[in-house]
Amino acid sequence: MAIPPIAALEIGTSRTVLCVGESDDRGRVKITGVGTYPTTGVRKGQVFDLAQARVGVELAAKQAEKQADVSIWQVLLAASGGHIQAVANPGMVPIRSGDRVVTQEDVEEVTENAQTIQLDADRQVLHTINQSFTVDDQPGIVKPVGLRGKILTLNVMAVHGLRNHIENAISVAKSAQLEVTDVAFSGICAGLAVLTPEQRRRGVVLIDLGGGTTNYLAYGNGVVSALGCVAVGGDHITNDIALAFTIPLNRAEELKCAEGCALIEPESGTRRITLSADIGFEERVLSCKALHTVIHARMDETFRIVRSKLDEGGVLPHLGAGVILTGGGAYLRKATDLAQRIFGLPCGIGLPVNVSGLDNVPQAAALSTAAGLVLYGRMTYEDRGILSPLKNLFKGVFRR
């Protein structure tokens, strides 16, 4: 059974992206339309001006509609921002059969138990992620049916965010005449697009470097072991540059993209950068080393915050596949080298390899979240019992 095209909306701090994807009955997803437009009215992943944010959504939607030759009235929405959190929520049930053998009924009961999340009224659950089962004192079990014991425990990670922030983003889409049918955490979406089953199995952390936020998603033994969002991104680097050299934000952004580097290279010590004159702006000559020092400080801080989060959860020793950077910030020169130094692990740039249609798109890593959200939409059809092919590729990623 064919499913209709899926539209995925990411209202980022610096850019709004809308991807349209189509899927065949073998589970393959192709991106057929992409619309992007600079975002205004959003800060650190959170909407503060509905009218301004709506403009980017409307124009991105028009681009995507034209490219995909479809009309869009429903979208999936990616959620990000420092308000996104994850909490462990174990469920526990006695094994009820007379011979103390775990049955499918036990699994269903403990799953329902673990997914009953008690949060403050202002929080909204986005996902519940099954991590592993424990039978008595034997942890790390993936398939407990048939094992013997007295107590069955399921460890679940609940991903949640502030209801008002999520509703504000939904209101932006609604004001652009788009109905939001589901909301997903941006970090999970990027992981769906970028990470391979082998990377998940070996253990990996994906760091999505956005304009106003940095999302991270770690896997160990094929299941999510840590995730979160840091309210620092590429726009903070731009602002740092503008303040350090007393230049306008637009010139600081141009300077970051053209001359930026995450490391302070020895050869930058004597090099000078000339900023040409513009209306109300006189020609300036800057030190390349000074520029790289400003950028390095913020990137170093960002990576160390993520590392501290992984250290807290004891995740770092289990990342056999290393670190993968995605998002627009992944293209900052030497960003992978800096990450390799800080995490002590190999690092590369992750592209949305689990979809087709983006091979010829420049800097496709900037589209990872929206492309992954299309995959997420494809999986929700499967969860409703309509389709099933993607389950093998993303088995164990999450439950809704």
Image (cartoon, rainbow, N blue to C red):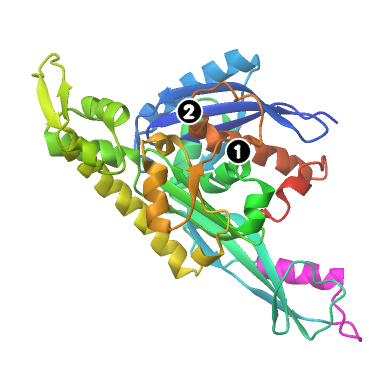
Q: Which residue is mark 1?
A: 373
Q: Nearer the viewer, residue 24 or 381?
A: 24
N-term-proximal mark, 1 vs 2: 2
Task: Please state the horizontal and vertical placement of residue 309, each as a whole percent of the image.
Answer: 43, 63
Q: What is the three-letter code of the residue carrying label 2?
A: Gln
Q: Secondary structure at mark 2?
A: loop
Range of the magenta residues?
96-115
Name the residue nearer the viewer: 378 or 140.
140
- The image shows residue 115 at horizontal and vertical percentages of 66, 65
138 shown above or below 154: below
Q: What label sits on residue 363 in the rendered view? A: 2
The residue carrying pointer 2 sits among few (fewer than 14), some (14 to 19) or many (20 or more) residues within 10 Å by Cα, namely some
Residue at position x 13%, y 34% in the image: 245
Say which quadrant the N terminus sits in: top right
Judge left or right: residue 85 versus residue 257. right
Could you tell me the amino acid type at mark 1? Leu
Above or below, 305 against 231 in this view is: below
- The alpha-carbon separation of the residues under discs 1 and 2 comes to 18 Å
**Residue 229 at x, y = what percent?**
44, 52
Residue name at image x 52 percent, y 44 percent: 186
**Residue 101 included in the magenta stretch of the image:** yes
Side of 134 relative to 243 (left or right) = right
Which quadrant of the view contains residue 248?
Answer: top left
Location of residue 179 in the rendering, given as x and y in whole percent from the top left corner: 59, 32
